[in-house]
Image: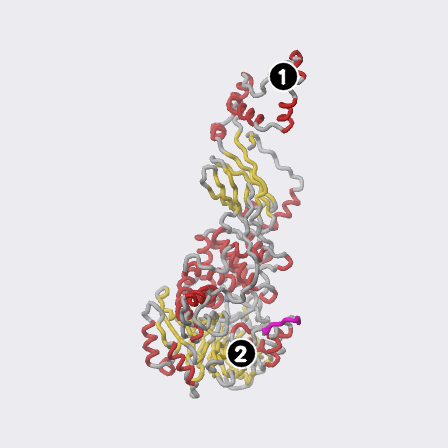
Amino acid sequence: MKKVILAAALLASTAGMAQRFEENRSKFEQLGTLLPTPNTYRTASGAPGHDYWQQRADYDMQIELNDEKQQITGTETITYFNNSPDELGYLWLQLEQNIFDKNSTANLTKTSAMEEKVSMYQLGFMTLEQFDGGYKIKYVKDKAGNALKYTVNGTMMRIDLPHALKSKGSFSFSIAWSYNIHDHNKLAGAPGNGRMGYEYFAKDNNYLYEIAQFFPRMAVYDDVYGWQHKQFLGNGEFTLPFGNYKASITVPADHILGATGVLQNPNEVLTATQISRLQKAKTAKTPVVIVTQEEAEANEKDKSTTKKTWKFAAQNVRDFAFATSRKFIWDAMQITQDGKPVMCMSYYPKEGNPLWGKYSTQAVAHTIRTYSKRTVSYPYPVAISVHGPVGGMEYPMICFNGGRPEADGTYSEQTKYGLISVIIHEVGHNFFPMIINSDERQWTWMDEGLNTFCQYLSEQEWQREYPSRRGEAYKIVPYMSMEQSKLEPIMTNSEQVSQLGNNAYAKPSTALNILRETILGRDLFDYAFKQYATRWAFKSPQPADFFRTMEDASGVDLDWFWRGWFYGTEPVDIALEDVKAFNADTQNPEKENPISKAQANEQKTISQIRNEKDIQKTLVDENPELKDFYNSYDRYAVTPQSKSRYEQYQASLSDEEKKLLASGENFYSLKLKNNGGLVMPVILKLDFEDGTNEIVRIPAEIWRMNNKEVSKVIHTSKKVVQFTLDPFQETADIDTDNNAFPSKAAPTRFQLFKQQNRRPANPMQEAQQTQGGQPSNR
Ligand SMILES: [Zn+2]
């Protein structure tokens, strides 16, 4: 404990200040030229500008599935609306199936190394050699049936227009194509595989198809890049314009099919029983089974040779996908979202039960409700979750999800929550990027990061303490603790990110959670986030539009936050280096002198202690004539002079100063160091002597003059016994050992490592075995 004397403030030394300012200002400098210059298409506030435009593409498709050859053929008529102010001489289309061509850029540039142990996954690129993948384009014709000149460039195709397409004009043309559908599990290691394909079930000799990126789709032409011209390499997903879709899909008559959009001809493809069950689902409180497991098992044996055509229509979507199989069980439950009906549905083979029947449609409905609250009201009439070979992939109104129990019907906790989480995530993608249509090929984080953040919030509303994989600040610590050279900023193109999961999902979702809980608070954040979603629903935002809207709508300058979290790779590591305690010195000799005297006598040195025993008599003791005034002088005695000096000092003080002196306040001078580099708020817990505590929150701007080291004085009426930095683990501080004063060694539990189980623990199965229960039949 030290004493502090009220005195005039010292002028800070100006030496080295200019240099320090240079070093420090970068953290709080405005993003400036890192962001594009605002214009009439995209404003400085982050909203679409008054000249904002976007293209539109309508599709009319006839598709046929060949279940014997696992082949798909189609013709499509695309009507392209040029809403841009520009004249277009050619059109670009996406041919993403061409990633399965063995000569695709993705395959040729996939780096690989041979080791003594190789997995089939690593050899995926070899299986691709034997697969005849990619589009076979039969023709490209204009409305009158005249062939149009086209050039295939990898996963893209250019169509040369006979006459330039004028601004506000439209152009219709048709394409006929076919391709071989790949076996999803066989081509697991091939680039771009993870999103579609078929699964073959040997036991009942049936196929289950999840079909997407299956038709030539219009590339995006916009005010930012012109024509989107990044080839599909596997990571950077899709960049697509909105439009209206009509699709007729012909499949074996015993198939059950789910797709983007609303079924137009239920009477032609559904039985009377199925139609009446669907009717029931409109008012049901729990999912109604439209095709039961028994019926699906009967279908499995059917192997119909006749065909049926399912017709769908979808308005204002950026894509179209479907799933079909004779193995499908189908259930449905309609909910009302903001006054509009949304039919939530699931399609799954019996292999997915009992998990799928219990949770899938409930998870779909939960997602629609929770995301609508935070972003925009779900605008589509249908939301579907399909179980097949794809682990998790999103399309408008429909998504493909993994998660399958054991053959005996038991499952691990990980499988259960993995399933619910992936459904929330993929259904959540309806909002980001299917409605808030960000450019996935450039910025994975704009849909995955925002969606993973919303997923976390929805999971926490599913059940208390839901085991969310991502979202909490402390969960990003292992990634952010990595060597700097292994990290890329979030603002890195989708194809250049080495750890896509951590960089594009986990870090941005954590950053947004921190922004909500620690920087802005829930009210300001939720308002701004909803504002972003509303502004950009059915439009195409860029990163700057997000950054600017969040600042504009919250009224908080967040440039330092975007700079640190999205443009930087530094971690958070704030250390509480030192705390010095002070009390106000009243200068009243009657009060202070006894305290000083007690402190002076508090601890004798070892020599003093031993001398008292060893030296019986000192020289002065033996010769008292050697003593004078100073041998009996008490430096702590209160004298008339010292009293009068105190009275003069008292007279010089204002009333406020007198009150402070009399208060007995405790002052603590804290020395904080920023070891990590990323500037963050300082959150302190003060534990008082009497067992109570207090939380002090200091905004990140405390670092604006010196981002390496700051000191801060805190005063309290109670005595502090313990200071703790970041007590709620909300800043992703990578080293918490330096977060306490007096310092505390955080105990780490260790486990003697013996063997690694290959499968996740399945206590459900163990319980069944101990009870001697029979495996459930599915
Ligand atoms: Zn995702």
Secondary structure state at the residue bearing disc 2: loop
Is 259 in front, or is 48?
A: 259
Q: From this viewpoint, is residue 82 visible?
A: yes
Tell me which segment is drawn in magenta: 114-120
Residue position for label 2: 183
Location of residue 645 (image quadrant) = top right
In the depicted structure, whether residue 636 falls above or below residue 90 = above
**Mark 2 neighbour density, 10 Å: few (under 14) some (14–19) many (20 or more):** some
Location of residue 139 (image quadrant) = bottom right
Residue drawn at 63 percent across, 29 percent down: 606
In the depicted structure, whether residue 89 falls above or below residue 459 = below
Residue 694 location (% of width, % of height): 46, 42
- Colour convention: secondary structure
Q: For the residue with label 2, is its CB less than 8 Å from the closest atom of ligand 1?
A: no
In the depicted structure, whether residue 274 falls above or below residue 733 = below
- The tag earlier along the polypeptide, 1 or 2, is 2
Secondary structure state at the residue bearing disc 1: helix
Q: Mark 2 is on which residue type?
A: Asp
In the depicted structure, whether residue 252 falls above or below residue 589 = below
Residue position for label 1: 630
